[in-house]
Amino acid sequence: MLFALLFGCDHGPREPEHAKPHRIVMPTINLPAGDTAPLGVIFVTVDTLRADYLSSYGHARVLTPGFDRVASGGVLFSQAISQSTTTTPSHASMFTSLYLQDHNVYSNFEALGNAPRTLGELFAGRGFRTFSIANMRHLNPEVSNLGQGIQTFVKSSNFRRADATIDTFLEWLDEGGEVPFYAWVHFADVHTPYQPPPPYDRFYYDDDERDPAKRSLKRIWPFLPEHMSDHPFFLQWLDGITDVEWVFAQYQGAVTYVDDEIGRLVDSLEERDLLHRTVIVLTADHGEALGEHDMYFVHTGLYEPTVHVPLITYFPGAGRQGVQVSEVVELVDIFPTLLEFFDIPPPHNMRGRSLWPLIRGEVPPERIAFSEHAGGNQVSLRSNRYKYVRHLRNNRLQPSYPFIEGKEELYDLKKDPSERTDLSTHLPSVVRLFRQELKNRRKDRFDLAVGEAEISNETVEVLRSLGYVR
């Protein structure tokens, strides 16, 4: 009964959904299957990229052939859920396979402690060259402590676009020869303020964004949090803009711009005869609200636009290409999946589970994904069918969406993918099951000590401009 209620089915285990026809846009040339031992891994995180804005995830307008190409040669996970909607906590979870309540990094002002073993440490311990390039100041190692095990960490100062990021990584890659490598490449171009370079800024908008007759941006202005709407950087970005559709188009243009750079990265690997020997992981730390629930240009809350992220993996030689997996997975699962592929023993404490059974076409037990909001404001549980959200404290980060301690929300994602109809009072039996599941999760925590973040005044101001400081 619990299985049927939480996962929305009537008869226990079902036919694997990933065996059904999928909607991946197939390019004309697939990635190579791999015929030699893997040399390295490139772990790409695109900050603030929601899954449904990629053509490989069904978007009818935004062009993302780079993501599509990697999906055609690998595996697309259609229901990947982030553990947080804030940058540093989410990356901390990805690199340690721990939930927020385990590593206790709940904001961009906090640092990961030294106790958790990171991917960088584990790969470095096996003789891999390790590299990271970050494009937000709070991800720098002195702030986040995410540089553990990273021998070359290219820090963020001023804004660095995706093309420069790729160039820097390729320069490092060319220095290594045949030495195995692990690299984390971070892009920030999709984060506010959305400012794709020409011609991407006009790809999805051909009107006059400053037409005084247009008033759509003014109408949504009251829904913006004050710490954004009154900030000089934010005001400068939108100075004279009257059409909110232009803002949406800038986000879309930024997605396509980053996608083109990912395509260039794949081409560069192919030119170096490395593509058939390199693991590629493409994902995002969290998504973005673009009007859903009257939230704009933020990643507040735990609704699907902010927690449902892309996850595409390419493992040369895996024998599975162009596959879509429809089961719920979590970003903490990337960690054990990479370790298993490279035969690296995992640490004792780990929340994720390897994705290899799903990649091989097996049907493991169903998953309930666990996400936590920055600052401990909310938690959510996400099954194949339902989303359960519980508010843990009172807070008003967004004018349209106050957090109310004790409030519960329940959505049937199959019937209501936009999460508009709260069923918490209509399905009490399902709510009770989620309450018990949450109680069990909250009791089972590692509760590790955080590190000490070095926060400069300049970093605080940058965080303020990005909407992280009130």
Image: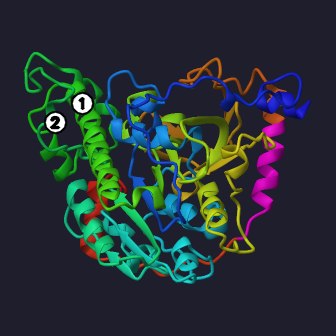
Magenta span: predominant SS is helix
Determine the residue positioned at 49% across, 78% down: 128
> Is 276 located above or below residue 423 in the figure?
below
Mark 2 and mark 1 in contact (Cβ < 8 Å)?
yes
**Which of these two is toward me, 157 or 409?**
157
Determine the residue positioned at 49% across, 61% down: 91
> Is 194 located above or below residue 3 in the figure?
below
- The numbered disc on residue 201 is 2
* Amino acid type, callout 1: Ala
How packed mark 1 is, by other alpha carbons closer than 10 Å (few <14, some 14-19, many 20 or more), is many
> Is 160 located above or below residue 428 in the figure?
below
**Which residue is under mark 1?**
249
Q: What are the residue bounds of the magenta stretch?
A: 433-446
Visual colour scheme: rainbow
**Which of these two is toward me, 202 or 322?**
322
How packed mark 2 is, by other alpha carbons closer than 10 Å (few <14, some 14-19, many 20 or more), is many
Determine the residue positioned at 41% across, 76% down: 178
Instruction: State the residue lying farthest toward the front.
Output: 35
- Across and down, in percent, residue 356 comes to 69, 52
**Which of these two is toward me, 382 or 189?**
189
